[in-house]
Image (tube, coloured by chain):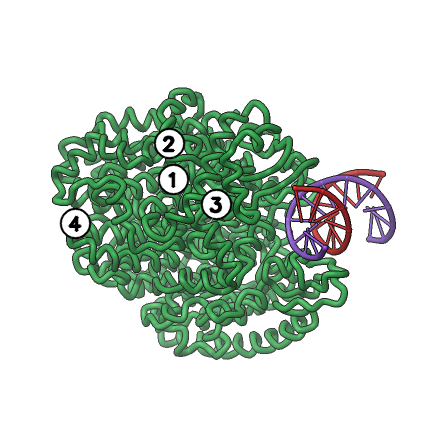
Chain colours: A green, B red, C purple
DNA sequence: GAGTTTGAAACT
DNA sequence: CAGTTTCAAACTC
């Protein structure tokens, strides 16, 4: 079974997770010697992310990935020199990376973006900027190295990932199972592919540095926690491994950083990760590709996306990640290390905001604490961390089931988180806290969840693992972050989670033989059980007795997550061990209902604007988001959790068959009315936008065009072959808006992937009319998992995400951009390319898709940028939409600049990909010198993969 | 903790 | 597609 492999990975991860291991590692010692900062074991870790609150921790996971990236960059600075001698491979890779200009540029762009973000958030920015730049270059080099080392990886990251993924979940669980036993398990688990990969990586790393190897182990542990997400089911799992690996690395890095010097850790982690990634890529590229194709199944769970902020999301993510994320991630990751970053970036974007926020807080904390550490390193690490987090988020995992999502996302808080995430792009900030607040109860849950998730990370080493299986990727990332972040907030919360997770994982390893016993055996589960119904991860834990957790009755299964130790299910087959069975069942279910595993909650394009506005505002999601299928409540009046709409904190829509609906989040009737109003508004906006667009195009103020313009533009643009669609799209875009844009992009991606058919239909048809359609997974993701949404949005349009991140970062990143300007361009190019890819995924006709994608991409870009400028030009609606996205971010002027380009791009792209792209690229570069480069390439790949993954997943696992 | 209610999922 | 059954969560006591 795959499970064994995952377990092995997890074991390795666990080992890596432990701070001590890192310290033990020669690399660590070496770094410690080099860096003024001395390795502080546990304490340091906490310090590393003392600022991070539990929520941040969640984000941390994503951050972790970001960190890893950043770290890499950092390492280059710090360690690169030191390591240069040690890590010849690394250096070589770097040089090689140059050959891979695109990947490198992307990496750089990402790094720069992340750095920018970080700087933006952190006072220490100046130092970071310097370090960042270096880091970026180095990072790029690393990436390139990985790529160069594994060309196949770069080309076909997803496949590789897929290979690894399957195992990863298991490994993750295993890793969770025991920290202490990690090593032993590793030995035991070796069978697992993940393990193998790790080993290989280690071997590779050995050449570089023994410390690196240790790091790898650490990663594996962290990954395990993350891996859990593999839930996507087996399909995803395959992919997950790769992702997980990446995440693991990132996690590892995180943990390391936290445990000791970030710089030290980062270096080690970077080095190791690179090798690992490359190894993974090389090894599994071909196979992975195949596996990837098979993996597509799920629509990833978007639990992750839920965001409840990062933390919640992180918890959720685990599950969500599993399928969609995993696949998506995998694809990106499959690309290679680059992908890792890229993949991560995909998911990250969503997360990023939250992460950023966290980071910001952390950074502040760090800044205070940083005094001890080298300012540059700390800052850079923090930056990296943030960027990573952003990337890591894996929002990609979007489509979670309402249940899972609702759990976490249910609260408005989630919504806020989402917005925050988006906003994070532009502004890192506050959202985390806000997110938590929404509903006390909900918050608590989310917190607990997040905490749990975090805890998994923190404690991941300790225990968990089982659960994680599905969410591995996201979780891993989260865990990583957690490690860093865990310090403060999560510590308490985390423990619970950890227990649950650890239990699950341990149990998983133990129970493998008897699924039935699985739950029973692990006391850990009990821990998880403690929580209401959620696992430590924040994912629901099921209590299935007759379904064996192989039916949609099971929340875990429905969410694409493996049952964790916290689950009280009986005769559970929804475990990594039974991955094959799970996959088969999933496929069967998907054959019946291709959308069975797609997110149940989707945002309506039309609603999106309002929702967006609402997002940050308290109300936010409910109105915008809708249940795909709608509820059929008769007695609960949609006022109890029996109602899925209510449970998801979304209003009922025309698609609902409920009787006596009194859904506080929105009544059917109101919904319909709202839709009509929105329609009118959107039409108006479109007209105005078109006019504006024309103006803009004439003036060539591409850069300055507003996001809304973009939205508007998109519709008007000739590219939209279907005027109607264009309008709709524009509207939807609009709504999704600037801020929404991310969602839109996400939609495009998700919509495409998931139910290619449905999504396409949705696009074609008025999204409004088809409430379900709309949204497509993306909205759901957004809704459910703010983070997930972001991730999805990004993931689908990786590019977009990357861009968005960049955009967000732009203001700050621009400075960096100057440095990375050259890179940016390539990235931008990639980005554009990616769009088409994302669309491809969608069932929609190429043209339409393209247009739509263009819209999405543009929107994404715009949205990113928009946040800054949106407000100015955008109509109220648009503004509103933007507002929700991120009130703060909106302010960034860069976005405005960017948006114009986007429009052009959109227009061009729509009209003709060729010209448009060029212009778009140029614009992008200007607008966001730094950010565009980073994710785009990866994004494009990721997007393609994601889209494919999504399409596969949604379509049916097709 | 046991039992009931509820509505989704699964089945026919 | 509609009706019924099964299932597990939500809810109540």
Q: Are marks 1 and 3 on the same chain?
A: yes
Residue beneath the point at 19% across and 36% down: A91
Q: Nearer the viewer, mark 4 or mark 2?
A: 2
Q: Which residue is mark 4?
A: A373
**How far is disc 4 from disc 2 in space, using C-alphas?**
28 Å
Left or right, A359 with reference to C13: left
What chain is tagged by disc 2? A
User: Which element type, helix, strand or loop, lies under badge 1?
Assistant: helix
Tag of residue A179:
2
**How far is disc 1 from disc 2 in space, using C-alphas?**
8 Å
What chain is tagged by disc 4? A
Q: Residue A630 appears at what percent x and percent y? A: 68, 58
Q: Which residue is mark 3?
A: A537
Q: Are marks 3 and 4 on the same chain?
A: yes
Camera-side residue of A274 and A99:
A274
The reply to whether callout 1 and callout 2 are in contact (CB within 8 Å) is: yes
Q: Is residue A830 visible?
A: no
The reply to whether callout 4 and callout 2 are in contact (CB within 8 Å) is: no
Q: Nearer the viewer, mark 1 or mark 4?
A: 1
Q: Are marks 1 and 4 on the same chain?
A: yes
Q: Is residue A107 visible?
A: yes
Residue beneath the point at 29% across and 66% down: A811
The reply to whether callout 3 and callout 4 are in contact (CB within 8 Å) is: no
**How far is disc 3 from disc 2 in space, using C-alphas?**
17 Å
**How far is disc 1 from disc 4 in space, using C-alphas?**
25 Å
Left or right, A939 with reference to A369: right
Residue beneath the point at 35% across and 67% down: A898
Q: Considering the image in quadrants, where does the C terminus of chain A appear?
A: top right
Q: Residue A417 appears at what percent x and percent y? A: 45, 61
**How far is disc 1 from disc 3 in space, using C-alphas?**
12 Å
Mark 1 vs mark 3: which is more N-terminal?
1
């Amino acid at each position: 079974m795959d499970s064994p492999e995952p377990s092995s990975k997890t074991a390795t991860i666990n080992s890596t997770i432990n701070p001590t291991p890192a310290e033990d590692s020669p690399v660590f010692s070496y770094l410690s010697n080099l860096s003024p900062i001395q390795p502080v074991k546990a304490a340091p870790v906490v310090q590393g992310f003392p600022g991070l609150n539990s929520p941040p921790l969640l984000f941390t996971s994503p951050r972790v990935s970001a960190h890893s990236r950043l770290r890499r960059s950092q390492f280059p600075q710090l360690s690169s020199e030191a390591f240069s001698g040690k890590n010849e491979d690394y250096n070589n890779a770097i040089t090689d990376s140059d050959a891979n200009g695109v990947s490198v540029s992307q990496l750089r762009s990402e790094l720069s973006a992340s750095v920018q973000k970080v700087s933006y958030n952190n006072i220490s920015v100046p130092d970071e900027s310097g370090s960042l730049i270096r880091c970026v270059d180095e990072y790029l080099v690393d990436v390139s190295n990985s790529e160069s080392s594994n060309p196949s990886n770069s080309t076909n990251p997803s496949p590789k990932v897929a290979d690894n993924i399957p195992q990863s979940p298991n490994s993750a669980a295993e890793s969770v199972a025991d920290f202490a036993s990690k090593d032993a398990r590793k030995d035991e688990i070796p069978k697992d592919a993940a393990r193998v990969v790790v080993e290989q990586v280690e071997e590779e790393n050995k050449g570089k540095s023994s410390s690196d190897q240790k790091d790898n182990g650490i990663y594996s542990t962290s990954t395990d926690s993350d891996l859990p997400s593999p839930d996507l089911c087996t399909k995803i799992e395959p992919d997950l491994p790769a992702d997980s690996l990446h995440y693991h690395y990132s996690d590892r890095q995180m943990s390391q950083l936290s445990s000791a010097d970030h710089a030290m850790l980062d270096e080690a982690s970077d080095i190791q990760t690179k090798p690992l990634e490359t190894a993974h890529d090389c090894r599994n590229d071909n196979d992975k590709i195949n596996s990837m194709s098979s993996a597509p199944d799920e629509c990833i769970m978007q639990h992750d996306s839920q965001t409840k902020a990062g933390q919640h999301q992180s918890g959720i993510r685990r599950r969500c990640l599993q399928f969609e994320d995993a696949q998506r991630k995998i694809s990106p990751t499959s690309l290679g290390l680059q992908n890792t970053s890229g993949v991560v970036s995909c998911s990250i974007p969503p997360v990023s905001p939250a992460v950023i926020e966290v980071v910001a807080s952390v950074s502040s904390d760090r800044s205070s604490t940083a005094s001890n550490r080298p300012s540059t390193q700390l800052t850079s690490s923090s930056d990296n961390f943030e960027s990573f987090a952003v990337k890591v988020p894996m929002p990609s995992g979007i489509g979670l089931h309402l249940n899972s999502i609702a759990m976490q996302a249910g609260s408005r808080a989630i919504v806020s988180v989402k917005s925050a995430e988006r906003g994070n792009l532009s502004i890192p900030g506050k959202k985390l806290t806000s997110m938590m607040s929404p509903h006390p109860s909900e918050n608590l849950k989310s917190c607990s969840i997040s905490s749990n998730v975090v805890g998994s990370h923190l404690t991941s080493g300790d225990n968990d693992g089982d659960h994680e299986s599905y969410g591995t990727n996201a979780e891993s990332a989260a865990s990583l972050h957690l490690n860093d972040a865990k310090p403060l907030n999560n510590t308490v919360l985390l423990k619970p989670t950890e227990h649950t997770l650890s239990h699950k994982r341990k149990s998983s390893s133990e129970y493998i033989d008897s699924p039935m016993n699985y739950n029973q055996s692990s006391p850990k589960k009990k821990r998880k059980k403690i929580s209401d119904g959620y696992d430590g991860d924040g994912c629901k834990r099921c209590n299935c007795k007759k379904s064996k957790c192989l039916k949609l009755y099971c929340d875990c299964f429905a969410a694409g997550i493996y049952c964790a130790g916290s689950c009280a299910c009986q005769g559970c087959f929804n475990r990594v061990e039974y991955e094959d069975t799970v996959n088969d069942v999933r496929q069967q279910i998907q054959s019946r209902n291709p959308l069975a595993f797609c997110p149940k909650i989707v945002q309506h394009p039309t609603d999106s604007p309002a929702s967006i506005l609402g997002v940050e505002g308290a109300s936010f999601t409910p109105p915008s988001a809708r249940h795909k299928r709608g509820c059929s409540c008769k007695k609960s009046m949609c006022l109890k959790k029996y109602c899925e709409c209510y449970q998801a904190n979304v209003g009922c829509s025309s698609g609902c068959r409920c009787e006596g609906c009194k859904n506080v989040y929105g009544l059917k009737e109101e919904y319909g009315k709202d839709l009509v109003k929105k329609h009118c508004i959107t039409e108006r906006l479109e007209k105005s936008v078109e006019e504006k667009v024309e103006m803009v195009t004439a003036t060539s103020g591409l850069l300055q065009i507003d996001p809304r313009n973009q939205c508007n533009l998109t519709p008007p643009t000739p590219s939209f072959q279907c005027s109607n669609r264009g309008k709709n799209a524009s509207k939807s875009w609009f709504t999704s808006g600037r801020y929404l844009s991310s969602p839109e992009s996400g939609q495009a991606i998700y919509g495409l992937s998931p139910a290619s058919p449905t999504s396409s239909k949705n696009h074609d048809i008025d999204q409004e009319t088809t409430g379900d359609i709309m949204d497509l997974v993306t909205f759901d993701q957004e809704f459910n998992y703010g983070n997930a949404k972001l991730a999805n949005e990004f993931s689908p349009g990786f590019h977009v995400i990357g861009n968005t991140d960049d955009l967000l970062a732009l203001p700050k990143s621009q400075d960096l951009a100057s440095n990375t300007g050259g890179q940016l361009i390539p990235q931008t190019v990639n980005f554009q390319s990616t769009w088409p890819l994302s669309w491809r995924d969608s069932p929609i006709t190429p043209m339409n898709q393209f247009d739509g994608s263009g819209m999405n991409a543009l929107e994404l870009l715009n949205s990113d940028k928009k946040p800054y400028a949106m407000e100015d030009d955008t109509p109220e609606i648009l503004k509103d939409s933007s507002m929700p996205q991120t009130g703060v971010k909106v302010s960034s002027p860069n976005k405005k600049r960017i948006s114009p380009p986007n429009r052009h791009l959109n227009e061009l792209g729509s009209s003709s990909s060729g010209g448009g792209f060029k212009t778009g690229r140029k614009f992008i570069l200007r607008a966001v010198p730094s950010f565009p480069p980073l994710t785009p390439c990866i994004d494009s790949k990721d997007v393609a993969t994601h889209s494919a993954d999504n399409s596969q997943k949604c379509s049916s696992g097709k």
